[in-house]
Amino acid sequence: MATLAPVDPAISEPDPAALIAARPHLRMDARDGLLLDGVPLAAIARDLGTPTWVYSAPTLLARYRQLRDAMAETGLDAHIHYAVKANDHRAVLSLLAREGAGADVVSGGELRRARAAGIAAAQIVFSGVGKSEDEMRLALAENIAQLNVESAEELAMLSALATAMGRTARIALRVNPDIDAGTHAKISTGRARDKFGIPYAEAAALYAHAARLPGIVPVGVATHIGSQILSLAPFRAAYQRIAALVGDLRAAGQSVAVVDCGGGLGIPYRDEIAPSPAGLAAVIRNAFAALDVSVKLEPGRWLVGPAGLLLARVVLQKQTGAARFVVLDAAMNDLIRPAMYEAWHGIVPLSPVALHAPCTEADIVGPVCETGDTFARGRMLPDLPPGALVALLDAGAYGAVMSSTYNARPLAAEAMVGGNSYAVIRPRQPIEALWGEEILPPWLDAPRA
Ligand SMILES: *Cc1c(COP(=O)(O)O)cnc(C)c1O
């Protein structure tokens, strides 16, 4: 079991200049302000308004290629299945599909999205603890690469459906290796107490059972121990257990062709030291190179997180006693990670002047009627007068996908940067769309007498 010490909030935080310096895709231009891969963000905010998500195609591609190349260097037959839930915009999916990436989906909706973005069914893996019958039927009809099965109950359902449809389900058993990934409790998935996967001790028997079931072909084992993992130790421990299981299964006469290593590789939001793709690849090679298996990886956050940010405008600064509040026009309905996981996101002004202005402590909040609508507390930031623009960094993963319209706030616009310009990839939701699909009961809809 490996755990990480929590980040000590008393340790000094990186200031905006340090945050920019640590991110090669960001640069502060003396005239145009903050640039994302060469494109001025202030111009995007001016054109599209705020809040607006901006993703960088070159950064996303560079990260994909870095991970793909690291896996290729292991000499293993390795496949990357992007975890669609991190950012399911078709522009993101299509970009990765063109590079040859497959997809890891966790719902029928994600499966259809991945297909709509041009990802071949043969490159799609379906994970998740509660696939419905309709979702299983869709997966079988599409003949996707693999379903990762999380329980005996699910296996029985799938066998019945596959038999009825005259199809065969290639399955991997998602095994819970009982490893504490040392990450936030809400994104830990590989401890015995978490809802995910099949208990390690039961996996071999269930695999043998699966091999006897009609409509089922077990092809391998899968694991996914959590998200935002900042140490290689839990990966190493989990993969060693999985490798041992593969040995046990084969000793018992089972065939195992695939090991699905899951996702979870973390990124530095603040100033954490995150493992490199090469480091993770080496751990995978050490665990599986001798086994003659093909390996799958399901990265989400690592690929898209740093490639995106959220642009927001300061509504006002409010001084109450000793506290300074900077109220943004973005809120928890746009980016819920700080409220949900106490996540830390870098916040930097877009103005080159502000970058060098003296800083004081401020709480950065949104306008939603919840105390939890707080992006950051006690952050050292310059004076940010009404209208000032800021970027919330590393918001490409688990950002827009988790948005809601709480407080009747329409979904923010989305843009993608590439080739020295940007494209709108989703206009701001029109306010009327918020109630456009609502229907009044007939007895309310009648004109009043
Ligand atoms: C969420 C998830 C992933 C991706 O996790 P990241 O931390 O974004 O890399 C991969 N596999 C499964 C099964 C998941 O649920």
Image (cartoon, rainbow, N blue to C red):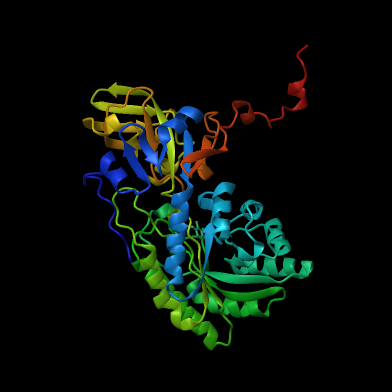
- Which image quarter: residue 355? top left
Return the residue found at the far top. Answer: 449
Residue 252 at x, y = what percent? 55, 87
Please provide percent x and percent y for residue 206: 58, 76
Position in image of residue 354 (x %, y %): 28, 30
As drawn, is 103 to the left or to the right of 54? right
Up-down: is 364 above or below 183? above
Could you say which is closer to the camera, residue 220 or residue 35?
Answer: 35
Looking at the figure, which quarter contains the N terminus?
Answer: bottom left
Foreground pick, 49 / 386? 49
Image quadrant assignment for residue 231: bottom left
Decide if residue 191 is on the left or right side of residue 138. left
Location of residue 263 with respect to 411 vertically, above or below: below
Residue 165 rendering spot, x and y as whole percentages: 78, 66
Q: Residue at x 58, y 52 (%)?
A: 94
Pick whichever, 425 or 305, lies toward us: 425
* Residue 145 figure quarter: bottom right
Give the mark count: 0
Asked whether residue 40 appears in the rendered view, the answer is yes
Which residue does the image show at 66% across and 52% down from the upper left?
Answer: 116
